[in-house]
Image: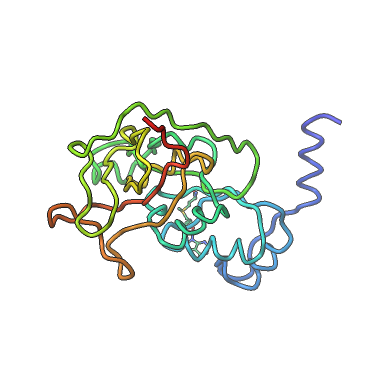
Amino acid sequence: MNDNEDFDNIIKNNPSSLFLGDGDFRSDECVNLLKQVDIIVTNPPFSLFREYISQLLDYNKKFIIIGHVIKLAYRKIFKLIADDKLWLGSGRNNSSKLFKIPDEFVDKYNSKYKKIPIRWYTNTKLKREYNDLILSKHYTPEEYPKYDNYDAIEVSKVADIPCDFAGVMGVPITFLDKYNPEQFEILELRNSDKYKTPLCINGKEVFVRILIKNRHPLDI
Ligand SMILES: C[S@@+](CC[C@H](N)C(=O)[O-])C[C@H]1O[C@@H](n2cnc3c(N)ncnc32)[C@H](O)[C@@H]1O
């Protein structure tokens, strides 16, 4: 059987049809469809991202879905990553993708393309590869200030994580692009939401940070 015949068979056995309702992923019709599938690959509505992922996990589904990088700073998504129930998929080191702007919006954005920092969020084990982040910097108290309100040092760039610091470090959320659970332990997410006070240095608030520890700091 050739590829075309395979494809014809798949279509024949999975005929598509229009939804009877509005196609809302929370509707009974969509939930019934969801129950029948093994894996979901999609681009869900950004505003309902958390709810959508919760639904997929409630139904114990495997998924590969695309979403904005800022979703990493959502407490619920972050917790799933810290608990190893969700991780970033292929291409996790790419910071942004270029999207074509539809012709009718080109004037509004004054551009034909827009860079959007997106990530693949998945719970499939396929091609899950971890490499140690190469750490070339050394800790000095001058270069890595401590927070006013937490016993940890500020590391404002992932590339600057020192190789020889055994304590807690605050790093940007893009750290998750390089996160190897065997190399680092994730402690918590700190942002300015209602559950936690943001981290401060000399009274100044620091943007979203993930608190981490190196599992094997160099003993120098
Ligand atoms: C980020 S866009 C993805 C667009 C898609 N990749 C495309 O090229 O058309 C999210 C899509 O989800 C749809 N959507 C919004 N709310 C939804 C809901 N509650 N249930 C199902 N789909 C929804 C939107 O209409 C939109 O088409």
List the single residue furthest toward the right.
1
What's the colour scheme? rainbow
Above or below 65: residue 101:
above
Residue farthest to the front, as pictured: 220
Q: Residue 140 at x, y = what percent?
A: 23, 35
Counting from the top left corner in percent of width and height, residue 216 is at 47, 38
| Relative depth, front residue between 149 and 118 | 149
Q: Position of residue 184 (x, y in %)?
A: 46, 43
Please tell me which residue lies in front, 107 or 73: 73
Name the image quarter holding the N terminus: top right
Name which residue lies at 26% across and 65% down: 197
**Left or right relative to 16: residue 107:** left
- Residue 106, compared with residue 17, is above or below; it is above
Camera-nearest residue between 89 and 185: 185
87 to the left or right of 212: right
Residue 53 vs residue 151, the one in the foreground: 151
Residue 124 shown left or right of residue 68 in the figure: right
Q: Quadrant of the C terminus?
A: top left
Picture coordinates of residue 149, whole percent (x, y): 23, 60
Name the image quarter holding residue 130.
Answer: top right
Q: Residue at x 50, y 40 (%)?
A: 180
**Residue at the spot x=30%, y=33% of the render?**
160
Q: How many marks?
A: 0
